[in-house]
Each structure stands twice: as structure tokens, then as C-alpha cells.
Image (tube, rainbow, N blue to C red):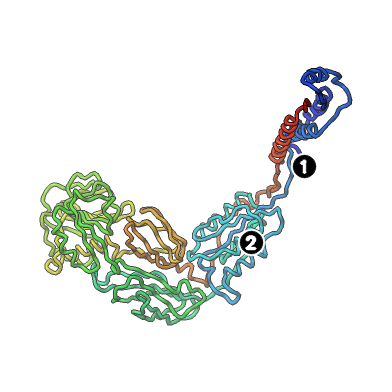
Amino acid sequence: MGFLDPGALIFFALIPLLALAYLVKERPRTVTVSSVIGFYALRGLRSERPWGWPRFDWLFLIELLILSLAVLAMASPYLIRKHTPVAVVMDNSAVMQVREPAGTRLQQERERLLAALPAGNDVAVSLFFTAPAPHPAATAVTVAQARTAIEQAAATDAPDDGAAVARLLSGLNASRRFAQILYAGVRPLGAPLPADVRTLTVGAPAPNFALGSFIVSGGQGFGAQRLQAQVSVANFSPAERNLQVELFGDDKPIAHASVHLVSREVGSVTFPALERAAVYRAQLSPADAFALDNVAYATSAAGESLHLLFVSPTPADAQGLAGLPGISVQTVAPQDYSPANSKADLIVFEYAVPKELPGANALLVMPPPGDPVFDLRDVGGATTQITSWRTPDPLTDGVNFRLLALRQAQSFAPHTWLAPVVTSNLGGLILAGSHEGHRYVAMGINPFPYLGSRNLPMSILTLNILGYLSGFGAVEQGYRTGRPWVVPAGITSITAPGGATFTVKPGALFSGDGRQGIYRLTGAGGAVRLRAVNLDDFTASDLEEEPPLKVDWTASGAPVPDFSEHVTLTSWLLAALLALAACEALVIYRRRRGGLQLAS
């Protein structure tokens, strides 16, 4: 024990002054008088002999303690308590679900961590999880609380980021805030390790078969009755194998395929003609120790009705689109369009432009010049012919531009973020690009009304553009566990596969609870959209090779700091002082209520 300001102890010299005050203070006596006149005589007696032997009572003892506590509080006493901070980094990534003869990897990790935790009341544990991104789970808790948190930890469906985990370990070591760092996981740490770092490696190399990307798209383009699916498959085993992939649509078997892969080969399976379904599930066999990557989910915008909003002064131009399967069309006049009240999956602006960027992918058909939102500038002159087009490109795929007739075409000057896809003799005829998370296409020719086979080149171009804007044929590999995605326009809540419901805002990032499966996206009007999220990570599925984490231990040679801490007692002293002051006030109050007794 010590004092931060020992000079304040000099105020203990005030104690004799307190005793002196009791020597000279009035000593009250109880006197019974027959009339009030005696009361005045009693007041005269009060001036008699102020000196004499002191008569200390409980009030004096209370004031003595109050004075002593005040002096001690000014001296700031403290206790030196040994403090042992420990950091525990626990791997909770998807690979901890792998089953082994001794149980899952997560169970083995728990047992080893619980046995390695140091004991003692002076130990403060800070627990960190690695997936989907390194984050703290508990800070400076007791050993008992840390054991409870470790026992309740669950493995996510998301892989971890090895580089981020290495940065976490390096930062913990460089901070010099922990006497010991415990790391438990499937990845070994590169040697040499600092003396205060201990690693607990779990799991053994194991063969594994895995599904990767699973995409369902339009088989014959936008609006096709049948769809096609493509599934990537990997064989992470030392021998060649025949693997079976069975496809389910709304939990009903609809297709089956076999693929032969040599050791460590990645292949793909294509299902060219699928019936429409809301949810597709691919199942891989034979089963193995890692069940999570033996199943994958997919949805398709073609599996549900696509809502298209047609904003035009000539709504009759949208009639041909209503005949396409899997699409619903709503027409509205430009003066009646409002971004706040017009929710759609795809918006077509014909001879019109919005006053602000719409909250959905949009097609601009022959937009009027001078709009402040897209800043599309016309090139003067008459567009007479198409000179070039970008290929390969989802917009130009299968289009014979030599047979494409131009009707009142206009060309655009170079744009800041819309790139030319089709070029005329004057400039860009069709521009495409992404901005603030949405896709946009601007056309200097009018493909509407949609005439189908009566104008085949223009119809194919129209379907390509609508397919590009609605997500058909997209090159992205879907949504992956642990990776946030943007909440679509009009969505107010999302229900995860585990049943948890999250309130969301359109345009915000959402990662959910990290589970693999089907997410239900609910709009303000109760409409539900489905989104598939998969592991889709062959690096995590490769259980035969676990490369060590390369951690920068730059602070490993620094001196070990003293983790003892000073626990001040000032707050406790002040609390006791206030309690005694309250007791003193109560004693004084009761004495005054007693007063003098007068007899008649």
C-alpha cells in the first residue's frame, strides 16, 4: 500500500484541534423547572466554567472519523494489484465444422483452449473471433466468463481472412498490452514465435469434395421459359473420383449429372434446361467430413416476376414487353413519376429522364438533352450508320448490327462514367456503365415497341439490354458468406436462413448472421424476394493444405512491460465519509428533537 500524495497526511494535526473544540464547547444539562423563568436562569448557567474534563460522545467519534477519512482521501492511498491480461484468438471460421474422429474441429479447439487458459483472480481475458472478420467477443473479463464465452462459441458458415487474422495477431503483439497471446485454429503460425505467443493447432489434413459457384441464368436470354444452371465442382483428394451432382427445384429433384475429376482438379457441370423454380439446391455426393460445401443454393430473377416500370409519354410502346414470360410491366407518365413512390426492379425512361438517380437499374431511351443528372450530351448531325460495337459483351451478344435499321438515331458525346458499347459515325450510340451500385444504359435508338420475331435484330438487342439490367447473364459469382452486400431498393427487412430477422435500409451494407442458405428480402408492401448466399470458397474447402500464417512479430524483442496496476482507494474513502456525514446529521437532528422538558 502507498500514497500518491503523502504530504496531505500533515492534516492529521487537525485532530487535537477537534478535541480542543470539545473542551470549550457548551456541555448541555437536563434541568427541570417549574416555570419559564427558570429557563432564563438555565441560560445563565451555560456561561459557567467552559473548561473541565472532556465528555466525548458518539458525535465526537463520528467527526473524528470524518476528519481522518478526509485526510486519507487527500493523500490518495492505493494498493498494488498484480494484473495478468491475456488475449485469446479463437478460430470460428467455416472449416471448424469439419468432423474428425475426436469430434468437430470446434469441439477440439474448445477443449484445448479451456485447458490452456491460465487460472487466477488476477487474470483478465480478452477474446477475439476470426470470422467473418477478426473482431472482439469479450474484453477484459474474468477466467470464468471467458470459459463460458468459449463454451458457447459457434462456428460460422463464413471463411476467415488469413491476412486480416495475421494483422490482428501482429497488432496484439505490438500493442504490448497482453502478458500472453493464445491462438487456436487450423492454420499454424510461422516460426519463430515470440515468447509470449502460444499456438494451439487443431485439425488434420483430410480429403474433401466441394461445390463452388452455383449460378442459374436465362438459357435462351431474357424472358426465356427455361433456364440453365452451372455448378463448379472440386476434388481435393489424392485420388481421382467420380462425383455426383443432383439438382433440386423447390425441394423436388429435377436434374442429375456426373463428373470425373482427377486429384486436385476443379471442373464444372452444366444443366442446360431447367424448369422454373423459386429456389434451386445442388447436392454433391459422396458425402465427406465437411458438409457445408457439399450443398449450394441459387435463385434466379426469372424464377419470379420481374417488375418493370415504363416511364414514357407514349405508354403504348410498352405493350410488347408485357408478353414476355416472367415480367410484369407498369406504365406511368413522366410527370407522375416519383423516385420515392416508384419501386421497381428495372426502370425504362423513354423520351424522359429522372430528376435524381433512380434506386434501381435503368434504361434511358433517347433522353432529352441537357439533363443535370446523367449529363448526356448529343452530338450534332444525323447518325447514319453503326461503325463498331464491343465484343464479347452481354449487350451485343448474338446481334447482327448490319441488319439493324436506324430510326431517328442520335449519338452521344464521350461521357464520364458511361462507356460506349455501340458506336456510330458520330459518337456513342449505346452507352453502359455502373454508378452508385446500379447499372445504367443509354440508347440513341428506340427499340420500342418490342416486336419479337418481326424485328429480330432489334428484339435480340432489347432482350440483351433488359437481361443485363435485370442481372441475367451477370459475370458475378453470386453472394458469399461473410461478404456484405448492398440492400436493394425498397427492402425494409431481411430474414436469414437461421430465422433471425433484421431491419435494414436500402443502399446499406448487409452481412446478416453469416449463414449459408436462402435469405428472404421483404419490401414495404410485403413483397418477398429471395437471395442465395453460399460458402463458394475453394481455398477454405481445400483441407489437405493449410499454409501457415505469416505474422509480422516486429515488437517481439521489446521488453516485457509491468502489468501490475495501482488500485486507488480514494473513491471508497469518500463513500465512507459521506455515509458518516449522514449519520452525524441524523444524530444532531434527534438531539434537537429531544430539547428541554418543561414542567408546569
Q: CA distance from mark 2 to mark 1?
A: 32 Å
Q: Please rate how many residues cluster around mark 2, counting C-alpha atoms within 10 Å: few if below 14, some from 14 to 19, many from 20.
A: some
Q: How many marks?
A: 2
Q: Is residue 271 visible?
A: yes
Tag shown at residue 98: none
Tag shown at residue 147: 2
Q: Nearer the viewer, residue 4 or 204?
A: 4
- Seen at 81% across and 29% down, the residue is 15
Q: Nearer the viewer, residue 508 or 273?
A: 508
Q: Position of residue 225 (x, y in %)?
A: 24, 73
Vertical position of residue 535 compared to residue 125: above or below:
below
Q: Secondary structure at mark 2?
A: helix
* Lateral position of residue 322 relative to residue 264, left or right: left
Vertical position of residue 70 compared to residue 472: above or below:
above
Q: Is residue 536 visible?
A: no
Query: Residue type at mark 2?
Result: Arg
Q: Position of residue 228 (x, y in %)?
A: 30, 73
Q: Which residue is mark 1?
A: 1
Circles 2 and 1, Cβ within 8 Å, touching? The answer is: no
Query: Residue type at mark 1?
Result: Met
Q: Position of residue 341 (x, y in %)?
A: 27, 52
- Seen at 61% across and 58% down, the residue is 88
For the view shown, which residue lies furthest in the front direction?
600
* Quadrant where the image shows the N terminus: top right
Residue 111 position by quadrant: bottom right
Mark sitting earlier along the chain (2/1): 1
